[in-house]
Image (cartoon, rainbow, N blue to C red):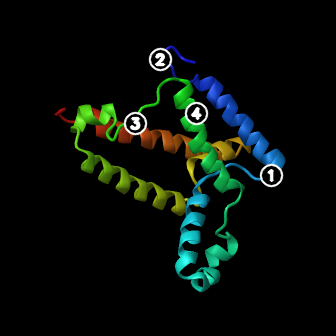
Amino acid sequence: MNKDGGWSPYVAGGLSGLVSIGSVWFVGKYLGASTSFVKTAGMLEKIFSPERVAKMPYFIKETPAIDWQWMVVIGIAIGSFVAAVTSNSFKLQAVPDLWESRFGSAVAPRAMVAFVGGIIAMFGVRLADGCPSGHGLSGGLQLAVSGYVALICFFIGGIISANLLYKGGDKK
């Protein structure tokens, strides 16, 4: 644990590396999460129009079903919860402290920004045919230059976004 109660980033990074290696070793697949969200959308769509989903080229290639990657996403949620509880940093709140100090405590604007941000992120993920874990972590494991370029771009984008949101302009 860190002095702030959170997990050490070195321990968390090491454990992530072990999960990545285990994924390749046992399943023969590199880590990634974004396809599971698309598969979930396909599973939901199958409820209403199974014949349409069966004919879609993407879902012919990526069958909309619960698989190892889908379970990894569930494991991330469970693991995050366990990490927060064991580090005594878990708390339920509709608006994070940093957001509240910059934009106020209203829930609706925060929810809208999170929703729109999620849509933009998922659009980019699908456009790039993979998520940061797929391109960055798994690409890095393969020593792929494109994986390192992707990681650099993710960090630059995150730094710019954080500075635009939280550093620029006057605080409320």
Cα distance between the residues tagged 3 and 1:
35 Å
- Label of residue 92 in the image: 3
Kindly report the distance in space between the C-alpha atoms of the residues bearing marks 2 and 3.
18 Å
Amino acid identity at mark 4: Val
Residue 148 position (above or below residue 112):
above
Q: Do the residues labelled 2 and 1 touch (CB within 8 Å)?
A: no
Q: Nearer the viewer, mark 4 or mark 2?
A: 4
Horizontal side, residue 112 vs residue 130: left or right? left
Judged from the image, the secondary structure of the residue bearing numbered disc 1 is helix
For mark 1, what is the residue? 27
Please state the horizontal and vertical placement of residue 114, each as a whole percent of the image: 36, 50
Quadrant of the frame with the N terminus: top right
Mark found first going from the N terminus, 4 or 3? 4
- Between marks 4 and 2, how big is the CA–CA gap? 17 Å
Residue lying farthest to the right in this orientation: 25
The residue that label 4 is drawn on is 82
Instruction: Identify the mark nearer the N-term, 3 or 1.
Output: 1
Given this view, does label 2 or label 3 mark the residue nearer the observer?
A: 3
Question: Would residue 168 be found to the left or right of residue 12 on screen?
Answer: left
Q: Which of 131 and 45 is in front in this view?
A: 45
Residue 115, how many percent across, how many down? 37, 55
